[in-house]
Structures are given as structure tokens and as C-alpha cells.
Image (spheres, helix red, strand yellow):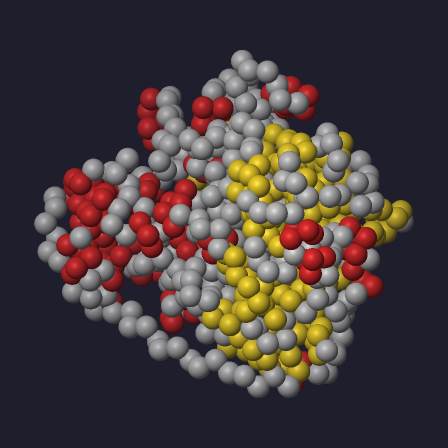
Amino acid sequence: MNRWVLALIAVALIAVLILVPDYGEQDSTTQEVGQDVATQTPSATTIAQIDDARIIDADNEPNSWLAYGRDYQEQRFSPLTDVNKDSVADLGLAWSKTLTTKFALEATPIMVDGILFFSSPFSVVHAADAKTGAEVWTYDPQVPKDFMRKACCGPVSRGVAVYKGRVYVATLDGRLVAINATDGTQIWEVDTIIDRTRNYSITGAPRAARGKIYIGNGGAEFGVRGYVTAYDADSGEQAWRFYTVPGNPAMPFEHPEMEMAAETWKGGEWWEIGGGGTVWNSIVYDPDFNNVYLGVGNGAPWTRAIRSPGGGDNLFLASIVALDADTGVMKWYYQTTPGDNWDYTAVQDMMLADMEVDGQQRKVLMQAPKNGFFYVIDRSNGELLRANPYVTTTWATHVDMDTGRPVENPETDYSNEPQWILPGPLGGHNWQAMSYNADTGIVYFPAQENPLLYAMNEEFKATGLFKRNPGTMNLGIELANIAQLMGEHIDKAPAAKGYLKAFNPLTGEDLWSVEHPHYWNGGVMASKGGLVFQGDAMGKFKAYDADDGKVLWGFDAFASILGPPMSYSVDGEQYVVVLTGMGGGDHFGGHTTDTAAIKYGNFARVLAFKLGGSQTISAPTILDRTIPAQPELTASTEDVTRGNHLYHQVCAICHGALVRSAGAIPDLRFMTPGRHEAFNQIVVDGILASTGMASFADILTNIDSERIRQYVISRALEDQAAAD
Ligand code: CA
């Protein structure tokens, strides 16, 4: 295979590994670990007093950024205008802050009272002076580093909620913590996880409204059952819990919606594997209807033939579910992908807006979920108003607007033969933020066309049996042999592409579209200054003209960027802030494009820009990408193949398909002789657990580990030979 073929395989493989989060069952407990903030720390009542009314009226204080998506509508549109088309050329770095982590920063900071609140990997919370970046306080919830093994996509954290003098963070290991916004001390924490025998994790930002904190979780690929819980913001007491998929039908239904959902699951024992439906990213509060909308994830396993062999829609997978914010009782739902078979989560960011649709004023919800269709839904009743494709979709021909259902394409049915399908499991759009300009009706967001070769799990095809492996992923598609299968079908593989799109959600047309060198890029913020800000995989942070996509300004951050920009103003100066680092879906590695993370390494920085800013970042050393001399390849061909299969089942999710990391996780082709010598101690004995590399002794023997090492050597030698 030549280089580009390998690259294509790798890209598609990465896509495989794009997983996502989910949940399980038992009551959470509240532990008081501190005094009430109001009595113990009087000053706590003076800062960060964000409440529902302030977030609803966020336009009245454009200098602040009060919530995850700026306000409850989550349009991420900055009303500030000092930085505009005419002035942006003068934008420069005001300050920067480099964190010690090697993993991605994905958070949207919240800015209030001159302080930025944001989270970093392993759910560490930072309060920093918004004008200088100086630390105010840091709170570390002490997540065990080896917990990273239980999370699909790195130890990332997408942010915090700030509410009534407190900062709320959900930790990677599933706790919800209330912190005093003034001094960073912990007030209470609760365990949100219902079943600690399953690999639940949390990377999403909690949302706050109605005196409650709402939080979901992830883990679908590992085999969990999804749910969302509302907690009393003051006490941490559980208010309600809504499950997104049914459990074992032999057990009582937790709430009436589960009885309805269970009728759409047929045959199989999905509850043994988990079912999926995790709400790992988007939860949006709607003050117009007192609703909370849940963006629900994919099925576990991905393949419906295993999960629900009798067919059925499998509610509420891949759905947008509207709940009463106070009671958790369902009002309506819309399922984007009935009978999900592709990891098509509907967890992507949701935006609320008021707009005229076909001559009628509507209160709508917008989402571009993974499946490639952009939905506009009436949030008073869940009526589907639009479902235009925003990227190439080969799994379905279109959405039937009469039934509201996608029409699946029989030509890409992968029940019997492997099929390249668009979008792949990374989605046409993933968690990276989008932005809406209500004045023009245009949505700006990062889109991608990134295929996967979907193939049924070979063991299931041969035996009709699929057993959950609690220690690793349970996808239902073929993982072990995927490298070979992709090689066999590489001639039909669509190329991976990435875009920044200016999209009209009502007509389905692009106002404009800019193609990026790499598919996995940063979130987006549009502004009243006529600009669209986005960082990219190549390490560039740019301002585009919102009208035509022309680049008006750029800054070389020397760091791949996924995080969403945000903006605020302090002492009369507007700042634009973005956080850097490669991770999420792409730390699975393999794409050979020269991203900043590959070229320089992964840097987690907070970058704050203002007009006249003159700080600089020195260019990092360009990494030597020459693969070093390798130890002797001593294993038989059969053992190398075994190592290949084990590697792609267990290791590739972090270290990258075909042993090519994307920068956030060590690239094993570059291991030192010492690492090779200690390989079994690392993999089996867990001597590097404190760095995040947990022991895999529960699923890998020393013999397995050595086979994997031999496969790593074989891959390094292949790439060495190709480079010569
Ligand atoms: Ca997933």
C-alpha cells in the first residue's frame, strides 16, 4: 500500500473510533464537604451572581459571557462590535496562559465580573483575571489519571456553569461539584453515576436554570445506558432523572416514557450491552416553554442487528427530547435517526431562535447532528420544519417531510457486505460549537465529510452471538480486522474533507463554504462586528468576513484548535478568547496532514486577543518525525496479525489507527529502547498509570502485550520503508 492509501485507511479508522459518551442505575448521594457558601464566605454573594433573569437578558450585558452558549438560546453570537471588519486587522494577542496538560482544551470560558471561569483536562477548574490571565484560583477535583481509560475521547472537559455565586463542574469520573466562585473551595459534590461497574464518564458542561443543575454523561461505546439528572443547585439533592433508553423490560419502568420507548426495542438483550443513548454534550434550557432539551446519543452497540434484531426505532436514541425543566416529564421528542446503525448521535449543540418560517413566526430549535441533516424544529410541539442535508449523506437519500423520517439508502446497507458510508461516526458535524446570526438567518459551523467502512462484526456474523466486553469498546461493527478490510476496499473510499460553512437552515444552501486542509477543526463564534472566528487543526486562528468567507485576519497559534471562541469586554476593551489543543475525535490519530499537533506537539493554551494587543508566542521546535531505529521484529506473521487485531480493538482508540497518533497521545512508533523493554510493565502492570496509561491486565496477558508490541514494530518498519 502506498502512503496515501494508508492515510485514507487511517482517516477512516479514526472515524471508527469516534465515540461518544452514555449511563446506568442507583441513587446518587450528596456529601456535604463544606459550609454553606453564604454564611462561610460573605464575599461569595458579591461575585458571579448569575441567575435565570440575567441569562435571559444577556443582550443587556453584552460585555459578559454568562453561560455555555452565552445565553439560554446558545446562539454564541457576540453583540460586541469594537472588533469588526474594519478594525480586525489591528487585533493582536493581549495575553496567553499555557497549561501544563498535554491534552486538549475544549471549554467555552464564562466571563462575569472580570473573571474567566473555565475547565481543563481531568476537570480542573480555573478562575483567571479576564484582563490579564492572572490566576485567581484553581480547583482540582483529583480525578484519578488512569480513569482516562474509561473515556472514549480523552480526559477533556467542555466547561462549567456559573450560577448564583457558584461554579459547577462535572468531573471525568462522574461527579458533579459545586465550588465557591469567590475562592474556589468545594461546597458539595454528588456522585451522578448509577452503576460503577460500567464505564461512565463526563466531559460535557453542566447547565443551570430554575434553581437546578442539569447533567448527563458518556460511555455508549463501552456499553452503558443513558440518562440525565437534575440536581438542586443549592443543596445538590436530586430533583429528577430521565432515562433515555429502556432497561431490562423484566424490571419496572422508571418513568412512563420508558414503557413507550420499550415498545420500540425488539428482540435482543440490549440492556446487557447497555443500549446507549448518552447525553454527553448538549442540554439546553428554554425559558419560553420552561423546557429542557436533551441531545441524545447513539445506540450501544452501534449495530441495530445486534441491539434490536426485531427492528424498531429504538427510542430515544439519536433524538432531541423536550422535558419539563421542573419535573423531567417528557413533552415531545423528535428522533433524527430511527434505529440508529451508524453512531449518529444527536448530541450536537442545539440553538434556540425565533424566526419566520413559510410566512409564520416560529420559535425553533436548530441542530446539525452527526447524520448530515440540518434540523429546524418547532419547539412548541416538536414539529419538523426543515431537514436539509448540510454534507454528503450516503446512508439516506433524504428526509421525508411528510413522515419526518429519513429514507435509508438500500445501496449502503452493510448487513452483508462492508460499505463506505458518509457521514462516518465522527459525523458531518460533531461537538464543535456553531453560531447563529439572527439578523441574517445564517448559521456558521464546522462541517466534515469523513467516511468509515462499516462492516458487521465478524464473530457475530459467524456465530450470531455478541458478548459485551466490559474492558473495551462494544461497537458491533468489525474493529479487530478493520485495517485489512479497509485496505481491501480502499479504492472506493471517499476522501476526508473539512469545511467552515455559512449555511441557511431554511433553504439548505451555503451562503459560502471554506475548505480546510484537515477535517477536524474548531468551534465557531460569529459577531455583530460582521466577523466569524474559528481556529483550525493547522494551528491558525482566523477571522472571516461573515458575508463572503474572506479571511480578514489570522494568527498562528502553533497549536491545533478545537475549542469555541468567545468574547467579552473589560474596562472598555473587547477581548476574543479561544482555548487550544488537539483531542476529542482526532487524538485517535492517523491523518497524515501536517497539523500543528503533529508538527509541533500538543499545546493547551488560553489565548486572549484585543485591538492593539502585541504579545507573541514563540514558534515551537518542529518535531523530528523520522521514525527511529526499531528493535528486532521476532514474532511470526500470525502473531503480528494477532497483535494487529488486539491493537485495533484495545489501543487504537487513543494511540491511533495503524499506530499513528494525532499528537495528544504518544505515537508508539517513536518509542525509546527503554519503553520497548518496559512494554509489558506499562501495558499489563500499569507502571505509567499516573500519567493516564492504565493497566490493561484485565483484558491483556503478557503474551498479548508482546504481540501488540511486535505489531507496533512492524508498522514502524513499514512506515520507515515507505519514507526511504
Ligand atoms: Ca458514539
Residue placed furthest toward the front: 40
Q: Nearer the viewer, residue 670 or 391?
A: 670
The residue sitting at 16% across, 40% down in the picture is 703
Q: Quadrant of residue 43?
A: bottom right
Q: Is residue 475 visible?
A: no
The residue sitting at 83% across, 63% down in the picture is 60
| 697 sits left or right of 172 in the view | left
Q: Quadrant of residue 109?
A: bottom right
Place of residue 56 in the rendered image (x, y in percent of width and height, measured from the top left) = 80, 54
Seen in the picture, residue 178 relative to 562 is either above or below; the reply is above
The residue sitting at 33% across, 28% down in the picture is 459
Place of residue 698 in the rendered image (x, y in percent of width and height, measured from the top left) = 28, 35
Q: Nearer the viewer, residue 476 or 182?
A: 182
**Which corner quadrant holds the C terminus?**
bottom left
Place of residue 24 in the rendered image (x, y in percent of width and height, measured from the top left) = 51, 30
| 201 sits left or right of 32 in the view | left
Query: How many badges with numbers are in the image?
Result: 0
Place of residue 76 in the rendered image (x, y in percent of width and height, measured from the top left) = 70, 60
Residue placed furthest toward the top: 250
Q: Quadrant of residue 95?
A: bottom right
Seen in the picture, residue 545 relative to 116 is either above or below; the reply is below
**Which corner quadrant holds the N terminus?**
bottom left
The residue sitting at 89% across, 47% down in the picture is 360
Seen in the picture, residue 95 relative to 698 is either above or below; the reply is below
Q: Nearer the viewer, residue 1 or 701?
A: 701
Q: Is residue 692 visible?
A: yes
Q: Nearer the viewer, residue 396 or 648?
A: 648
